[in-house]
Image (tube, coloured by chain):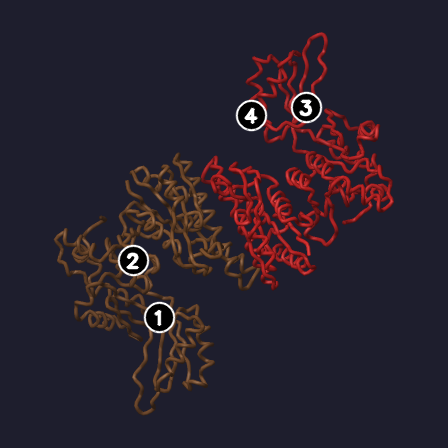
Chain colours: A red, B brown
Amino acid sequence: MGIVVQKYGGSSVADAAGVKRVAQRIVNTKKAGHQVVVVVSAMGDTTDELIDLANEVSPLPPARELDMLLTAGERISMAVLAMAIQNLGHEARSFTGSQAGVITDAAHGRAKIIDVTPGRIQAAIDEGAIAIVAGFQGVSQTTKDITTLGRGGSDTTAVALAVALEADVCEIYSDVDGIFTADPRIEPTARKVPRISYEETLEMAAQGAKILHLRCVEYARRYDMPIHVRSSFSEKEGTWVVRAADVTVVAQEESKPMEAAIITGVAHDRSQAKITVVGVPDKPGEAAAIFRAVAEAEINIDMIVQNVSAAATSLTDISFTLPRGEGQTAMTALSRLQESVGFDSLQYDDSVGKVSIVGAGMSSSPGISARFFEALSEAGVNIEMISTSEIRVSVVVAETQVESAVNAAHAAFDLGSDEIEAVVYGGTGR
Amino acid sequence: MGIVVQKYGGSSVADAAGVKRVAQRIVNTKKAGHQVVVVVSAMGDTTDELIDLANEVSPLPPARELDMLLTAGERISMAVLAMAIQNLGHEARSFTGSQAGVITDAAHGRAKIIDVTPGRIQAAIDEGAIAIVAGFQGVSQTTKDITTLGRGGSDTTAVALAVALEADVCEIYSDVDGIFTADPRIEPTARKVPRISYEETLEMAAQGAKILHLRCVEYARRYDMPIHVRSSFSEKEGTWVVRAADVTVVAQEESKPMEAAIITGVAHDRSQAKITVVGVPDKPGEAAAIFRAVAEAEINIDMIVQNVSAAATSLTDISFTLPRGEGQTAMTALSRLQESVGFDSLQYDDSVGKVSIVGAGMSSSPGISARFFEALSEAGVNIEMISTSEIRVSVVVAETQVESAVNAAHAAFDLGSDEIEAVVYGGTGR
């Protein structure tokens, strides 16, 4: 009898009906013979409502108190979920992050997990109860204050608890069936990927796929904890996120060619903007000054492209992408540098999007980038910036062309075809 | 520089505007040179909304989880209040009941305070911060689970913290100016009582005056902690609840006759119902059987009247009052006894009300009851039941006559008159 950790997001427990549906699913897992630990997020829009309330009394709510406030959201959902389970005749006990032993540093709003000591959780499941744990929250090791883990916090709580409890699997539930070869709202032939490596998942997430947060995947990868991404609205198998070697093993068992996995999926991201610093003197230290200014403004830069300087002028252009929400701050920080660095002007474009192809087999398969760029060209998509990693090629295009670019890439690598998917991933579940 | 504990109820912090107003008041107290500890209830209707949510998923929510759920309400209000104070430029830190050291037994929903160990609160105020503490909640000494104190819990938290911190005073804020000689909505000449003894306050509260809960007054009386009942909507002095001797001392200092205090106020209660068990055989054990059945159904009985039995029949009638919400349960429990006890019938009347006069001087002043009953009679009010204590006389009347009864009693004891009030209570504050 193994331990299963399940995490349900806010959309799965948006209202009483959702809570009851999730309770039934948890009870089914328990009845199937597992010890069950559930991590739950705040119901529906609760967190946003609490933030609104905070802003009503304070333009810049202090971080310690904001954490105290926001953790009320999970407290509500976990207690209600425990009630719903007990109403189905099964013992359930809810625990705050602190009670569950989620020990963090003292960085309010973005605390890092230092340790997990789930003694009370282990005791509860050993006594036959279902343990319900508040996601997203912990307690500071030094100050004993309540902390929150920041974005993706509940997923990370679930994986960290799964690791500490030596669970068989961490199931992450949302309202989608798993990880897809592309966003099905854009690409109608997109298919669910049955099995994907931690590394590919990280690249997909970093490039805009919204299923899992980077942080929880990194944690799972570090401790080799399998994640099963699935929908709380269906009984279907979802996507298993596992070690690259385990992806290979399944393919092998099913007599699939071992090196067939080239492209796993197409990710896109519409949340970025592009800043171009025009006419930067092409001498040492200028780029450094620019990016130091941006870093000091705490802007998260993604792609950077520097053009070769025109020989005649010794001037170059530097472009980079960043989250749109940080665009104004970055432009302000940069304009202060205009005189000292001596560049000509700043251009800001928030009508851009990023499209990426991700695949573990890419590095050993020449010609992938060429095939990607040709497909974009044939679809009339103009490439503004390019960046690559070992298992990814990303391009920045006009936002209006994101959809065409996703469709073109998806088709170019036959991601919608049954055969190819079968060749690449074959297995469904473990 | 003394410690002041202030408690704000849900109506004082019903919305963001209320929170800001209360924050300003707290800051003013701090600026006046006090160390300030604030106990706060859940905002407005939060608790009721959370109970509704619980009932949506479970007809009988388990008590441990209901406590976990309800404590989210104070968590929200205390964090938001701390934010609002910080926004005024003063350091404020919020603490859960558990963090504040409110240790209770494990009786969920009606936990009793066993100990208060306010180390973190003392440290916070010693560092110059304002401490905000969640009312109504604690942590079980044995199970380490979160508990709630039940009705009046926040008032009790405030008094218990004031005692543990050796505060100068516990200020209890609501939306009324203090304790009145009668409910001003019924009696237009009702006057605020500047100073009242714990004992009289207990009787007033027990008889339906809604200012303070019995439990918090009992706690304050046991440890001799002065309570200042006042409105968060005005700067006026409210009512000081103190030792009887201190009431006398002030009267003496102000050269008032020492034994002038006869009647302090008139309380009324419209939440009661009356059950009459008709035709009970007048022999030993019958009344006991009836009240054992009612006790086993966990009904809280208030007044009991047994008529003298009619000699001819050896049958008697037993009447008692109880909260209306428990009427159905009591009637069901009693009907099951009809055969074994052999009474004739049950009568249920939920159109009754209780009117009481309360005053410490009553026991040494003969004729008080007579004056009360005469006044009621002159006002055409019919008395259905009577009960008395050392410092109280209560009558049950038809609900439609409650108002007339209050007015008649108020007038009979000159409670609306300036002179009398001055004679009795004179002092305003300490």
Q: Are marks 1 and 2 in contact (CB under 8 Å)?
A: no
Where is mark 4, residue-wise?
Answer: A297
Where is mark 1, residue-wise?
Answer: B302
Q: Earlier in the sequence, mark 1 or mark 2?
A: 2
| Foreground of the two, B292 or B40 | B292
Q: Are marks 4 and 1 in contact (CB under 8 Å)?
A: no
User: Can you say whether B371 is above or below B143 in the image?
Assistant: below
Dot 1 falls on a residue whose secondary structure is loop
Where is mark 2, residue-wise?
Answer: B222
How far apart, in angstroms, are the residues tagged by discs 2 and 3? 71 Å
Please provide percent x and percent y for residue B182: 28, 60
| Foreground of the two, A377 or A167 | A167
Dot 3 falls on a residue whose secondary structure is strand
Q: Quadrant of the N terminus of chain A?
A: bottom right
Dot 2 falls on a residue whose secondary structure is helix
Q: Amino acid at mark 2?
A: Arg
Pointer 4 indicates a residue of which chain?
A
Please provide percent x and percent y for residue B233: 34, 47
Pointer 2 indicates a residue of which chain?
B
Q: Earlier in the sequence, mark 4 or mark 3?
A: 4
Q: Quadrant of residue B267?
A: bottom left
